[in-house]
Amino acid sequence: MPNAYAAVPSFLQWSHLVFSRLNARLEQESAEDIIAWAVETFGPGLAVGTSFGASGLVLVDLVLRVQPDADIFYIDTGFFFPETETLIAQVQDHYQRSLRRVTPALSVEAQGAQHGPALYQRDPDMCCYLRKVEPLQTALDGSTAWVTAIRRDQASTRRRTPAVVWNERYAVVKVAPLIHWQEAEIWQYIHSHKLPYNELHDRNYPSIGCWPCTRPVQSGEDLRAGRWQGQDKVECGLHLVR
Ligand code: SF4
């Protein structure tokens, strides 16, 4: 019988001091170097999440240059725009490989039957919990590190994102290689590497999530101003809890 404790990785015991030393070092390094460090440190325990936004596409490309068979997953909330569905097919075609699709426990229809219709209007926090926060636990089951594409310039809630941090909720090390990137650099990378991207970006949707909660933005607005418009909500919850 395998010894369950033998599989417990040492980074579960990393102290605050370890994280602070790591951040002092990784803070100075490029996204490519942070990714190389993460691949070497976590090996097959590394899981890379993308929602196919512009940053998520850059992250996938950078990771696959280092680790072509990396575990890349996305959460299909059931509320993707048709343009996002098209992009997912394009990305898989571009890299000639499939990405791991994770779905919520309840289908959109089952959620409607259980919680009533349009939960995203009445209780978007609950809707995000059921369709994003819970499925992320499934996505990260068996993983020791979660690599994410969040950047400090995206929103005030993300300004202090560290390169690496222990994530209590999912019991993984969360790695954010793109913290220093700016929107313009992301787009320069996408265009220079000819990456596919969501055509909604060309129609004033800088940040794209589920269709019921995403609107185009006006000139000068925050990048995420089109998310949950009219609601007192700026994050889906995935990145609020460390
Ligand atoms: S973004 Fe909107 S539709 Fe998507 S899970 Fe959250 S509340 Fe539901």
Image (tube, helix red, strand yellow):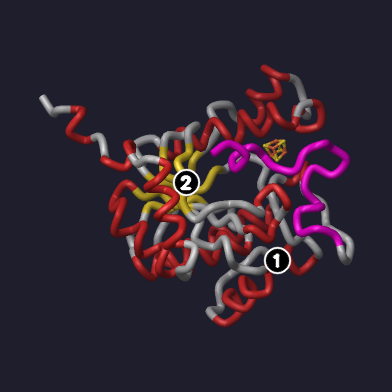
Q: Which picture quadrant has residue 114?
A: top right
Q: Position of residue 172 (x, y in %)?
A: 41, 40
Which region shows up in magenta? 221-242
Q: Position of residue 142 (x, y in %)?
A: 34, 37
Label 2 or label 1, whichever comes before in sequence order:
2
- At horizontal 73% and vertical 51% (from top left) the residue drawn is 156
| Residue in front for this viewpoint, 5 or 88 | 5
Q: Residues within 10 Å of mark 2 (few under 14, many from 20)?
A: many
In the image, farthest residue toward the bottom: 192
Answer above or below: position of 82 versus 193.
above
Answer above or below: position of 126 versus 17.
above
Q: What residue type is disc 1 on?
A: Glu
| Residue in front for this viewpoint, 77 or 182 | 182
Q: Position of residue 62 (x, y in %)?
A: 45, 68
- The disc placed on residue 49 is none
Q: Is residue 228 magenta?
A: yes
Quarter of the picture containing the C terminus is top right
Q: Is residue 218 magenta?
A: no
Answer above or below: position of 100 versus 206.
above
- At horizontal 62% and vertical 67% (from top left) the residue drawn is 197
Name the front one of labels 2 and 1.
Answer: 2
- The disc placed on residue 199 is 1
Indicate the quadrant of ligand 1 in the picture: top right
Q: What residue type is disc 2 on?
A: Val
> Does dot 1 land on a helix, a strand or a loop?
helix
Q: Which picture quadrant has residue 166?
A: top left
